Image (cartoon, rainbow, N blue to C red):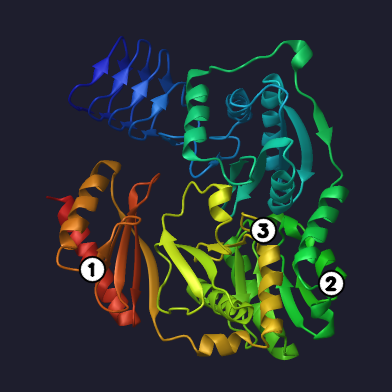
């Protein structure tokens, strides 16, 4: 057993083979079974039992017994989302308490939109969540199964709705459920709101209204919401263009909820298309890497054989987009970003005015665009009025928010917008890619505990002395004209995010090896 300095234990039972970090405080009645690791600055409330082989993250507040699962997080929210193993870390009890904590932050009588994907775990947790909102005096419009993009469009266009919540399975781990919270502008709730909800959750300071003011559930059949979404798209795009110019594309819905509406939109605007995987299938979604590989191969073969103009892979939850060019090649994330920026540059030139773009600090910057005003910075806690200053907000990871339509990411609208610009300016995606200068982009991670992240920031800043560098987000150091490394400490997990741009793969690997060795050396100082 190892117990750090300044640990305060009041009438607790501690079993064998436990590790307690510095400044841990445990109130009377805690029972800590064997094989647990408790991080620094952890606060354990009264009468909590922690079962064997659990990991308690640093600065956690443990307010209830930890029986299932293997890890206790120091915060509930990550970027406006809550996720955990379905029916283990995210139980019905937790979902109800989370709803009560969230509902407590909203005025009594407010209306919240709720939706989910088609997984049974999402359905179960959503129903538990509904009860918590009703007990806090919140009315609910239940959309049941609907794409989150539809919920967000309806939320942002109706001021009488104060928030939205969407339940779905984690794309790379089907055993986990993700609960995403949206504000009245259909953006993820910011860190300030998340902290208020967490505080109410841990202290169980819930609002329980009188029985006469308990909220109500109103169900929707989606018809009105789908019609409004389709009309909004057609109002912005020159819909007749797609049928007049004979554009032909392949679209893979990847078994996502967008299949409920997007095929109808394509047919309504007369876009000739070949549709893949436009039906629910939990088993195929359970292995997203296998599905993605097969979808890429199928789409590529179809594009080549039928000489289609492009291919688009709509990821299951309607936000991420992969693009295949007319040669059947799957574009990398940075290549896709370059294609969209190139099309927007032509659009701006034709209109005679520059367009404003926001990109995160980690996006590639190998090309300058004459008619685009590109701003780079930290991609977090955006407000709707800030996003509307830009024509496009993108992540460089397949997510595009064209703010003329909505301030949130929407892969369905992005697909049609990209196609419209291709047709309008009579350009093929393969031609745009051929004009892209040769470069190599790489993203990776390096292990780093929470306690060492501040030190790593200081060491990177010291290493940057005498070189060109930026601190817009993390520390970005230029190592040549088109070569740089960017280090951003992960806010929620114990690692550093490393992004590298170089003129060749060999140069990129050399930079990665050099800084990986430096990080390992610095962590031991």
Q: Earlier in the sequence, mark 1 or mark 2?
A: 2
Depth check: give the residue in front, 449 or 20.
449
- Label 1: which secondary element: loop
Q: Mark 2 highlights which residue?
A: 269
Viewed as shown, does residue 465 lie left or right of 240?
left
Which label belongs to residue 454?
none
- Label 3: which secondary element: loop
Q: CA distance from mark 3 to mark 2?
A: 19 Å
Judge the density around disc 2: few (<14), some (14-19), many (≥20) Cα neighbours within 10 Å: some
Q: CA distance from mark 1 to mark 3?
A: 38 Å
Depth check: give the residue in front, 225 or 324.
225
Depth check: give the residue in front, 341 or 294.
341
Residue drawn at x 25%, y 17% as measured from the top left? 8
Residue drawn at x 80%, y 29% as measured from the top left? 217
Q: Mark 1 highlights which residue?
A: 468
Q: CA distance from mark 1 to mark 2?
A: 49 Å
Residue 21 locus on image (x, y percent): 25, 30
Residue 394 locus on image (x, y percent): 53, 63
Which quadrant would the N terminus be assigned to in this image? top left
Q: Quadrant of residue 514?
A: bottom left
Residue 268 locus on image (x, y percent): 87, 69
Q: Nearer the viewer, mark 3 or mark 2?
A: 2
Residue 42 locus on image (x, y percent): 33, 27
Q: Is residue 67 visible?
A: no
Q: Mark 3 highlights which residue?
A: 318
- Label 2: which secondary element: loop
On screen, residue 484 above or below 83: below
């Amino acid at each position: 057993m190892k117990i750090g300095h300044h640990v305060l234990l009041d009438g607790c039972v501690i079993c064998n083979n436990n590790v307690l970090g510095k400044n841990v405080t445990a109130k009377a009645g805690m029972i800590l079974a064997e094989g647990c690791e408790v991080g620094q600055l952890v606060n354990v409330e009264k009468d909590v039992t922690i079962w064997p082989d659990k990991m308690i993250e640093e600065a956690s507040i443990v307010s209830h017994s930890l029986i299932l699962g293997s890890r206790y997080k120091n915060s509930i929210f990550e970027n406006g989302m809550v996720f955990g193993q379905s029916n283990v870390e995210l139980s019905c009890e937790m979902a109800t308490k989370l709803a009560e904590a969230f509902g407590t932050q909203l005025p009594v009588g407010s209306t919240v939109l709720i939706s989910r994907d088609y997984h049974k775990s999402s359905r179960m947790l959503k129903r538990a969540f509904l009860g918590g909102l009703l007990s806090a005096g919140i009315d609910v419009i239940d959309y049941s199964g609907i794409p989150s993009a539809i919920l967000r469009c309806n939320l942002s266009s109706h001021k009488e709705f104060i928030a939205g919540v969407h339940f779905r399975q984690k794309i790379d781990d089907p055993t986990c459920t993700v609960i995403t919270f949206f504000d009245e502008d259909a953006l993820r709730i910011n860190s300030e709101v998340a902290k208020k909800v967490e505080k109410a959750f841990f202290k169980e300071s819930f609002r329980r209204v009188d029985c006469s003011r308990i909220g109500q559930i109103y169900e929707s059949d989606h018809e009105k919401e789908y019609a409004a979404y389709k009309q909004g798209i057609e109002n912005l795009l020159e819909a007749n263009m797609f049928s007049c110019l004979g554009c032909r594309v392949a679209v893979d819905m990847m078994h996502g909820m967008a299949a409920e509406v997007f095929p109808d939109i394509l047919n309504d605007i007369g876009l000739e298309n070949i549709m893949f995987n436009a039906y629910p299938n939990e088993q195929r979604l359970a292995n997203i890497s296998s599905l993605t590989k097969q979808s890429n191969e199928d789409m590529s073969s179809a594009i080549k054989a039928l000489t289609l103009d492009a291919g688009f892979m709509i990821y299951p939850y309607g936000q991420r987009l992969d693009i295949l060019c007319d040669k059947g090649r799957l574009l990398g994330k940075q290549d896709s970003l370059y294609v969209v920026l190139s099309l927007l540059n032509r659009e701006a030139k034709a209109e005679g005015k520059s367009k404003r773009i926001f990109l995160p600090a980690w996006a590639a910057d190998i090309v300058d665009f004459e008619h685009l005003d590109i701003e780079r910075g930290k991609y977090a806690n955006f407000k709707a009025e800030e996003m509307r200053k830009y024509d496009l907000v993108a992540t460089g990871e397949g997510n595009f928010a064209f703010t003329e339509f909505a301030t949130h990411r929407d892969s369905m609208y992005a697909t049609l917008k990209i196609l419209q610009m291709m047709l309008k300016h009579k350009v093929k995606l393969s031609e745009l890619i051929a004009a892209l200068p040769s470069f190599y982009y790489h993203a990776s991670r390096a292990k780093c505990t929470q306690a060492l992240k501040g030190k790593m920031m200081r060491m990177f800043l010291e290493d940057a002395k005498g070189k060109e560098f930026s601190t817009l987000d993390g520390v970005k150091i230029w190592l040549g004209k088109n070569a740089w490394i960017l280090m951003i400490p992960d806010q929620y997990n114990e690692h550093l995010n490393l992004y590298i741009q170089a003129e060749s793969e060999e140069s990129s690997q050399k930079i990665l090896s050099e800084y990986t060795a430096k990080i390992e050396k610095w962590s031991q100082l």
